[in-house]
Amino acid sequence: MPDHRCTSAWYLTGFLLLSLFPGCSLVPTTPETLPGYSREALAQVRQQSADLKQLQQYPQPSPTQQQQIARLEKELQQFERDVIRAAGALQVQNDWHGAMQLLKGAARLRPHSQSLSSAQQQLRERRQLHEERVRMEMAIHQGEQLLKDAQAYQRLQQLQGPGVLNWLELKNFDRKRNASAQSLLEFSQRALEREEKTDDQLVQRALKVARGLYGEELLLPQNEHLRNEIEQELAAVNNRLRPPQPRRTPQPRKKIERLPIAELQQALASGDLVSAQQHIDRLQQKAPQHPQLTPLKSQFNMQLNARVDTALKTGNDLYSQGHIEEALTVWREAEAIAPENVELRANIARAQKLLENLRALSAPFGKKH
């Protein structure tokens, strides 16, 4: 009588051996794909890479082969530049995952490309830095909320004869407050080590919130080192944010009176950045060495950056809530004073495309707008 267990074992062994042969593999292979590129284009890149590798193996290539090598290298380098540029556009749209997948897919076609490898590393670093800043902003918001809650907990602490529940609530709040302050200090220290001027305002906010969270505890003798550390870091970042002092060089009185200094200061005070930009251009043209030009330009840039950041956040909030046209209006107003801002232009293009798609979907069948 045959042994069914042995028969089953033979069938299983045969099935496993069959899957090892490439021609008989039961797992379907998926052809390489890359967003924005057809299969024919990718097949051409793959063939060009193989041809280049073969030609580079010749110890003394002929003049014709040298021309072929130069042509293939130029075409493949153009492919790599196009991929890196497309990945940068995806990053601007905040599609970090899509950008990395695009670079990885291109690297599988060009595994020895230094430019693609460098682009991946730079994208990872930028993504880590972006994530660090986002987490720092979240920590600042949480700390600011705890500062608002601190007054309520102080009133709770002043109640006569607090019960166990009040005591536990106060202890829990103190732990949250200290943990938040410590987290903000760690974020600030890492940002200061990066020495990026774009982080200075975040560091300033974080240190002020941390100092507020510690409160009167910083006045205790055992916390003197912590208090000095916060004050030194805050003084350093305040000094970096402070506009440089202008050189006091004597200027002819008539020329100073004809320059639009007062108009520029008034425009900055009222927040009229369009007029301020015009006055700065006139001042730059008439007196490029004027001692007040640099601090006024710094003040203008600070207001411009704050206005653009607010517009980006407001527009993103409106966009996420489905108010596309309102978000587009906010972004366009900001673009009027910052036409070179890449993020604003990308958001506007994205919103316009979405509105076009929505209008096309809502149009009667067969009717074109």
Image (cartoon, rainbow, N blue to C red):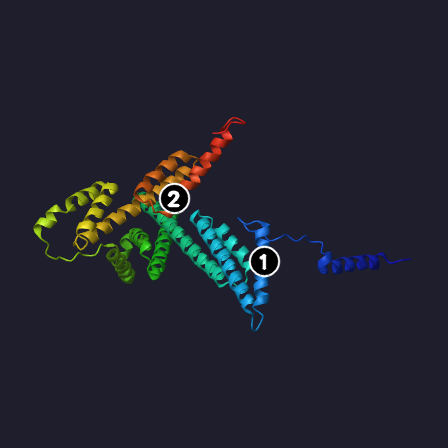
Tell me if I can see residue 43 in this picture: yes
Outermost residue on the left side: it is: 253
Left or right of residue 193, residue 280 in this image: left
Which residue type carries mark 2? Arg
Give the residue drawn at x 44%, y 41%: 350
Within 10 Å of disc 2 (Cα), the crowding (few <14, some 14-19, many 20+) is some
Disc 2/disc 1 C-alpha distance (Å): 35 Å
Of residues 183 and 127, which is closer to you in this image?
Answer: 127
Residue 263: percent from left, percent from top: 17, 43
Mark 1: which secondary structure?
A: helix
Q: Are marks 2 and 1 in contact (CB under 8 Å)?
A: no
Where residue 109 appears, as percent x and y from the top left, is 56, 58
**Residue at horizontal 19 percent and vertical 45 percent from the top:** 264
The quadrant the N terminus occupies is bottom right
Eye-nearest disc, 2 or 1: 1
Q: Which label was assigned to residue 108?
A: none
SS class of the residue under badge 2?
helix
When the figure is inspected, residue 263 is found, relative to residue 72, above or below; the finding is above
Q: Residue furthest front?
A: 63
Is 269 positioned to the left or the right of 328 in the image?
left
Tell me if I can see residue 153 in this picture: no
Numbered mark located on residue 46 in the image: 1
Q: Position of residue 250 (x, y in %)?
A: 10, 56
Q: Does residue 35 appear left or right of residue 202 in this picture? A: right
Numbered label attached to residue 345 = 2
Residue 9 placement (x, y as % from top left): 80, 59
